[in-house]
Image (cartoon, rainbow, N blue to C red):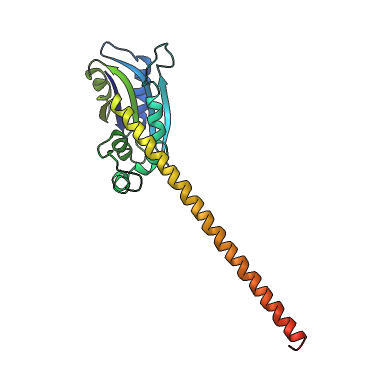
Amino acid sequence: MQNIITAIFRNESEGFQLITELRNAPAAEQASILQMALVKCDGKGITVCDSYDGIAQSAQNTLLGGLVGSLLGILGGPLGILLTGSAGALIGNMNDVGESEMGSAMIEIVADKLMDGEAALIILAEEESEDYLNAKISKFQAEILRYDAVDIAEEVDEAVKIQKEMNRQARMQLRKTKSDEFKALRKEIRAERKAELEAYYKEYQRYYNL
C-alpha cells in the first residue's frame, strides 16, 4: 500500500539526520521509500531543504510518482502560506471559493502544525507494515502523520482547484484595482484641466473687461 508519511520535527537537524539515514537504506522488507522531501517553515512560507527521488532513479512508473512534488507545490504556494498557522480562519472563510471538505485534510493539518522554524519530512512509501518507518521516526522527537496516498492525490487535486480559484480572484481584484485607479486618475486630470480652463477664462474676462 502506498502511503504518505509525514514526520514533524521541532529540531531541523533531526530531520536531516532521518532523511540521510533513509536515503542510505531506502528499501527494506516492510517498506520501500519512493520519494522524500524535507521542508521547513521560515516565516515567509515553506521551502524544501533536501529531497530524494527513488522513482526517477528507477524504471518503475507510477501514477503517484509526482505526488510529493505536487504536494510541495501546494504547501509552498499561496494556499499553503495562508494555511500555515491560520488554517481554521482560512477554511472558515472560503465561501467565495466554494464549499471545502478540507476540514480534516492532510494539507491543512501539516501546514497548521508547521509553526515558524519547524521542519517536516514528507515520505511517499510502499508499506507492507507501518512498523519499519514508525521505528525509524520514533528515534527522534517527531510527530507522525500517515495517510493513504490515493486520498492525498485526491486532496491535492482539490487544493489545486482552490488555488486556481484564488489566483483567478486575485487577478480580478487586481484588474478592478487598476480600473479604479485609472478612473481616479482620469477624474483628477479632468478636474485639473477644468481648473486651468476656468482660470484662463477668468483671466480672459479680466483682460477684456468683460
Q: Where is residue 55 in the image (x, y as percent from the top left)?
A: 40, 16
Q: In this view, does 175 lie to the left or right of 150?
A: right
Q: Position of residue 140 (x, y in %)?
A: 28, 27
Q: How many marks?
A: 0
Q: Residue visible at 35% across and 32% down?
A: 156
Q: Residue visible at 40% across and 29% down?
A: 70
Q: Is residue 75 visible?
A: no
Q: Is residue 101 above or below residue 130?
A: below
Among the 4 quarters of the image, the one containing residue 147: top left
Among the 4 quarters of the image, the one containing residue 128: top left
Q: Residue visible at 34% across and 42% down?
A: 83
Q: Where is residue 134 in the image (x, y as percent from the top left)?
A: 24, 22
Nearer to me, 140 or 53: 53
Among the 4 quarters of the image, the one containing residue 188: bottom right
Nearer to me, 120 or 141: 120
Q: In this view, does 139 lie above or below 81?
A: above
Quarter of the figure with the N terminus: top left
Which residue reaches farthest bottom?
209
Nearer to me, 93 or 52: 93
Q: Can residue 150 be seen in this view?
A: yes
Q: In this view, does 208 lie to the left or right of 115?
A: right
Q: Position of residue 110 (x, y in %)?
A: 31, 35
Q: Residue visible at 74% across and 81% down?
A: 204
Quarter of the figure with the C terminus: bottom right
Which residue reaches farthest right?
208
Q: In this view, does 60 lie above or below 177?
A: above
